[in-house]
Amino acid sequence: MIEPKPLRVGMVGYAFMGAAHSHAWRTAPRFFDLPLRPELAAVAGRNADGVRAAAEKMGWASAETDWRALIERDDIDLIDICTPGNTHAEIAIAALEAGKHVLCEKPLANSVAEAERMAAAADAAAARGVYSMCGFSYRRTPALALAKRMVDAGRLGQIRHVRAQYLQDWLSDADAPLTWRLDKAKSGSGSLGDIGAHSIDAAQWITGRNITGVSALLETFVTERPVAGDFVGLGGHGATGADTVRGPVTVDDAAIFTARFEGSGPGGGQTEPGQADSGPIGVFEATRFALGRKNAMRIELNGTLGSLAFDFEDMNALSFYDAADGPDAGFRKIQVTEPEHPYTGSWWPTGHGLGYEHLFTHQVVDLIQAIAGNRPPSPSFADAVQVQKVLAAVETSAESDSRWQKV
Ligand code: SOE
């Protein structure tokens, strides 16, 4: 058997996403027959002790304290960006211009202008066979990939409603510390960009239609928090007490918005042969204060022939209502673990189920196959620009009394 060529990866950042991506690069070749063999060549981070420990723990062959070193090294083919959004544009553009493929965590950037610069660099690089992907990992959930397959096959007919919620509760404690996700200068926004972006991308991808306008409100429930001494992850508990230094929260804790998709709205109807086709309308919610909801990334689509419902807290199942079932119709719960379902055939026998980390393995599998096939990976940076434009429209609407804002 011909040994696949190596794909030597350099990863920037080694916190939660760095750990998930490291797991994916290590695991992918052990479960999928890949045309390129990923190698964990180097991880970069500013703290020398921290990045060396991370390299050891996560399986990286070397450690660097400056991401620029990864880009200068000729033994690295792909840069994997797992850092806060304010660093994405500089790193991705430098990597692409240096001829290195890029996987960049979501959201792509902290502004539309930055995202568009990244997409322009990605287009120029793709012309030279250098590819890029944005890490909207939920597309790689087998149940959501099946939902997309079913919508594309017309099993729901015309989609009328999209109802998307992403509910977490790790900030419900007012003394949870001030981490980078609560600092607009680093994260760009709060629940909106961190988790709402996943819902926006999933809704547009599954329906095949972009959001064209929104009306929104953003809320910050807790306006200041204890400053985190050393790195504290999601839901970590900072020091509390009279002498605790507190700092301002500069992002939203919760985002709620309504949306129109392509084809909906006055005059927006797109007629297809034999059928007037108006697009869906949507209701979106993203929050870190839904006490009791830990990672409930949910989406429900209601069409003219059927409905689909998904909740990541039951991630191996997809609920389907088929109107053709007549009076006996009810939501049936599909266990998305059959070999015929997306991705699942490479893992365990039917019924054994997958977890959060599998999304990241599927993500690098699809990226590797696209690169080896010399075709642009999906979601592209251009897809991520569309998400960024929706994020910006939500913020603009929320700043103007929820006035309707075109995307
Ligand atoms: C925190 O809200 C977070 O880690 C997000 O940043 C990830 O994108 C999501 O997959 C899980 O929650």
Image (cartoon, grey):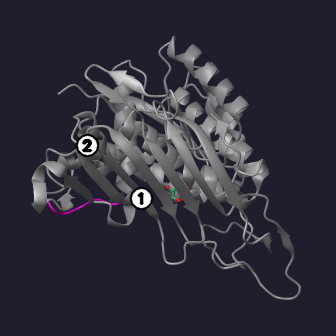
Between 333 and 321, the one lying in front of the other is 321
Q: Residue at x 72, y 50 (%)?
A: 398
Q: Main secondary structure of the magenta part?
A: loop
Q: Residue at x 49, y 23 (%)?
A: 131
| Residue 98 on the magenta segment | no
Whole-angstrom CA distance, mark 1 to mark 2, is: 18 Å
Q: Residue at x 46, y 54 (%)?
A: 164
| Residue 352 on the magenta segment | yes
Residue 37: quadrant of the picture: top left
Q: Earlier in the sequence, mark 1 or mark 2?
A: 2
Q: Give how far across and how far down residue 176 sits, in percent.
A: 69, 75
Residue on which the image places disc 1 = 298
Magenta part of the chain = 350-355
Give the secondary structure at mark 2: loop
Residue 108 appears in the rendering: no
Give the secondary structure at mark 1: strand
Image check: 348 left or right of 143? left
Residue 89: quadrant of the picture: top right
Q: Give how far across and how far down residue 138 sits, in percent.
A: 41, 49
> Which residue occupies the extreme front position in the image?
266
- Label 1, residues with CA under 10 Å away: few <14, some 14-19, many ≥20: many
Image check: 129 left or right of 220? left
User: Could you tell me the amino acid type at mark 2?
Assistant: Leu
Q: Give how far across and how far down residue 70 sits, in percent.
A: 62, 34
